Image: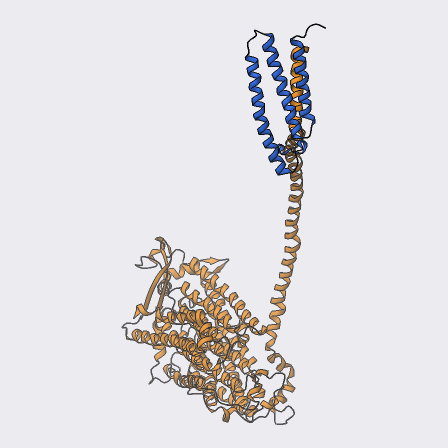
Amino acid sequence: MAKYLFLIPLFPLIGAVFNALFGYSIHKKKGEKPIHWLAILMPVASFVVAVMVFVNLASQSGEHKLLTNHLFEMVNIEFVKINMAFAVDQLSAVMILIVTGVGSLIHIYAVGYMHGDESYWRFFSYLNIFLFAMLLLVMGDNLIVMFFGWEGVGFASYALIGFWYKDVNNASAGMKAFIVNRIGDFGFLVGFFLLFWGLSGAWTEVGHHYVMGEEHFTITFTELHKLFANEEFVNAFKAKTFMGVSLATLVPLLLFVGATGKSAQIPLYVWLPDAMAGPTPVSALIHAATMVTSGVYMISRLNFLFSISPWVMVVITGIGALTALFAASIALVQRDIKKVLAYSTVSQLGYMFIAVGTGAYWAGIFHVMTHAFFKALLFMGAGSVIMGMHHEQDMFYMGGLRKKMPKTHMTMLLATISIAGLPGLAGFFSKDEILWKAFATENQAISWWPYLVWGMGALAALFTSFYMFRLYFMTFSGENRADRIPVTTHHGDDEHHGHHEIKESPSSVTIPLMILAFLATFAGYIGMPHLFHALPNYLEHWLEPVFETSTEHIHLRHGLEHSLGLEWGLMTVSIVLAFVGFFVAKRFYNNNPLIEDDPNNIPAKLKKKFAMFHEILFQKYFVDELYFFFVVNNLLRLNNLLSWFDGKIIDGIVNNVALVVKIFTFFAGAIDKYIVDGMVKGVGNIVFTLNRRVAALQTGRIQTYVIGMSAGLVLIIIIRYILL
Amino acid sequence: MSAIGLNHFLILATTLFGLGIFIISTRKNVIAILMGIELVLNSANINFVAFSRYSNGNIDGHIFSIFVIILAAAETVVGMAIVLMLFRRYKHVNATDLDNLKQ
């Protein structure tokens, strides 16, 4: 099975290349069908192979299950060999299943959503390349291959977010995503270089004893893992410093900067909400199955590196908790349905970073998985709603869709319950596990840190429950408010559909929704908390070997190892918070017609009372404006300065040099023209003048010649006979 | 005045030669030039005959002059033919305008 691993990323690549090359003409001649059939078939084929790989992997005996597929050698420097190789262990197996599975569903969904788009083929080509890049990222056997995927995902997201590039906003959202990601990638790269430096010749003969029995060092994750399990090496690594900071701190921190870019954490999260500009399937793909989970995956993959430095763990959990709370509070007041979901994603990613930061890597991956299901479902449901509302995204103009779109309504409701953390559904188990681990794991740097992180996480959970049910009630309950849409914001091209005809989306949209709804409901049962001792925790058990080195560094706090009571207590708190959020949202928004002056309209009154608060939240803490003021503006100013420098100084130097050269050449030219040429021409002139004189003798008239001849004769006679 | 001797013939021949050269170099008409050439040739003939008469008395000079006369006739034929061709081509036989040799 191992030698077929390469098929998994290859299939989407084929689809992407084929549609990119021939899609245009196929779309023109044969319509949309061949395009989406190919584009869907490829990820589905990948999914099938992925399932087979998973089964094969599961049937392997022993703790360390690993399938590798070596394709070709990329770099060969004496002891170091870097291969284009794929590896699947327990962690990547879970990831490829999520990526290909949810990815395939999104492809199917896109058939309905993108129907009639003029660049249909381009869209599916991009979607496939996105999957290809993401699979490269999760299947890469070493950091280099992973980095290819890492960059490829960045490119694909740029292409897809700016898919409708004719609108300036979309195009600039794509560029924003790309640039912000580049900043993260820069951190990632520097971290990677420092890591390589920090390996300090572990592959040379001197350092050979670190890598026991390896002939060549190939910097695969397996070898890195082995290295970092070696105490001697870890101490050498910690002792190595760069600008006074230990590599053990610096490398994970820089890699984490990369993760904040890709996984949208403070301070680099700003691109993700703007990524809403892309078509909804793209949002679902970016937010759920791919891209944003890559940071979490990378940290889990390099867990042995991250867990050796307690301070890094503090930073990661801190950023994660802050992001979770911050983004959740923004989501409380947003009106755009996709904006709410976008900030919700940022917030949920914060939870994942809390998990990987506390060392509960499996919980992070668990949340990646459940989040992939319910967030993909929420986005696709929102897309379905937006289609039903004829491209209206403002929730204030929705409402009453429960009866009009029953399938969308049911699936969205399940997803909402799942993400809000009401007990029994997938989101509850993963989020609760994260909060429990955040609370109970000992922090080696700051002893009170777990309380703070847990507090922020719990508050964010309350917010999550509130904003999700707010979204649900505003969209589905009460009466439809589409008649209040101001004419200007209503898209003109939908005029012929008629204003009030809201109907359920086609089956290519609703079937993926139902599959995801099933997963979002039941996926939680593979990672049951330890409380229920009778039930096995399949996922944790499955992922355990991957994280075994780092779990040596992670301990539960003293006295908490067996305190079931506390775990029950915390779980109760989460459940209560989730229900509080639900009831408040229900009281505020259920069947609320949202008329400004209505005395029963509590949100409007609160909005009036706390107008400033509302404004700050609604404007997203003015982060974009701050970025613009402090970063973009200064960059522009720097840009202007450099432009001035270039224009005046550099160009001045160049111009002055040019002037000197010009003067010099003037003189050189004069010498050439008057002296050298003069000499040449002078000789010519003399010859020419003489020639003219002499040539005058040759008249062509015989008589002149006769005269000359006679004169010559006379002359000879005179000289010969008279003078001599 | 003494009896007519060789010098008189030589002076006559020289005069004829000079006149011939004068005609060749001054006349515009090609036929006139040909006539000048006849004069020059005939001046040479006079010289031949004169030298023949006043030297050892054989007839070499006479034969030579007859030869020259025949040659002059032939030359005149060729010359007239050329003149005819010139006339056909240029519609005139003006020697001063026939300066194509310059090129």
Q: Residue A431, located in which quarter of the rendered image? A: bottom left
Q: Give residue A171's position: percent from left, percent from top.
A: 56, 71
Report whether residue A602 is seen: yes
Does B59 appear above or below A261?
A: above
Nearest the eye: A433 or A377 = A377
Quadrant (top left/top right/bottom left/bottom right) for the N terminus of chain A = bottom left
Depth check: A622 or A545 in front? A622
Q: Residue at x 58, y 24 (%)?
A: B73
Q: Is residue A448 above or below residue A464?
A: above
Residue occupying the far right of the picture:
B1
Q: Quadrant of residue A13?
A: bottom left
Q: Nearer the viewer, residue B11 or A38?
A: B11
Q: Is residue B11 above or below residue A388?
A: above
Q: Quadrant of the C terminus of chain A?
A: top right
Tell me the blue chain.
B
Depth check: B74 or A340 in front?
Answer: B74
Q: How many marks?
A: 0
Q: Residue furthest top?
A: B2
Direction left: furthest residue: A61
A656 sits to left or right of A406: right
x then y, percent, for residue A8 = 36, 71
Model colouring:
by chain
- x, y (%) of residue A36? 43, 77
Q: Is residue A557 visible?
A: no
- Spot the orange chain and give its letter: A
